[in-house]
Amino acid sequence: MFNLKGKIVVITRPSSGLGDQTARCFDKEGSNLVVMARRLERLRLLQEEVEKLDI
């Protein structure tokens, strides 16, 4: 596929569904994520889960 390591990726509505899974996939490939959504608590949950995977 493509080399996404270190690339900046902007994802809107990552607090559930397709946006959530897309964010996780880009993170897994080493991208730097910029996420925007209305539900701050869900964004924080996503952030915590993604940070655990990056260890």
Image: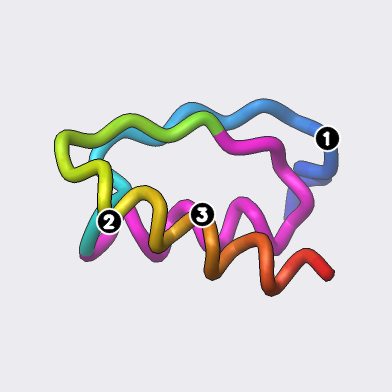
Q: Is residue 54 above or below residue 14?
A: below
Is residue 11 toward the left or the right of residue 54 in the image?
left
Q: Is residue 18 above or below residue 2?
A: below
Q: Which residue is drawn at the image coordinates 22% and 61% (left, top)?
A: 16
In the rendering, which numbered label is found on residue 47?
A: 3
Front tag of 1 and 2: 2
In the rendering, which numbered label is found on residue 52?
A: none
Q: Main secondary structure of the magenta part?
A: helix
Is the residue marked by circle 2 packed among few (<14), some (14-19), or many (20+) residues within 10 Å? some
In percent of width and height, residue 3 lies at 82, 45
Query: Going from the N terminus, do you reach mark 1 or mark 3 first?
Result: 1
Q: Nearer the viewer, residue 20 or 2?
A: 20
Which quarter of the picture shows residue 8?
Answer: top right
Is the residue marked by circle 1 packed among few (<14), some (14-19), or many (20+) residues within 10 Å? few
Callout 1, which amino acid?
Gly
Is residue 53 toward the left or the right of residue 21 in the image?
right
Q: Which residue is drawn at the image coordinates 54% and 62% (left, top)?
A: 48
Give the CA separation, mark 1 to mark 2. 24 Å
The residue segment tinted magenta is: 17-33
Q: Which residue is drawn at the image coordinates 54% and 69% (left, top)?
A: 49
Is the residue marked by circle 3 packed among few (<14), some (14-19), or many (20+) residues within 10 Å? some
Which quarter of the picture shows residue 27?
Answer: bottom right
In the rendering, which numbered label is found on residue 6?
A: 1
Residue placed under numbered mark 2 in the picture: 42
Q: Which SS class for mark 1?
A: loop
Q: Nearer the viewer, residue 7 or 39?
A: 39
Label 1 with label 2: CB-CB less than 8 Å: no
In percent of width and height, residue 53 lies at 70, 73
Callout 3, which amino acid?
Gln
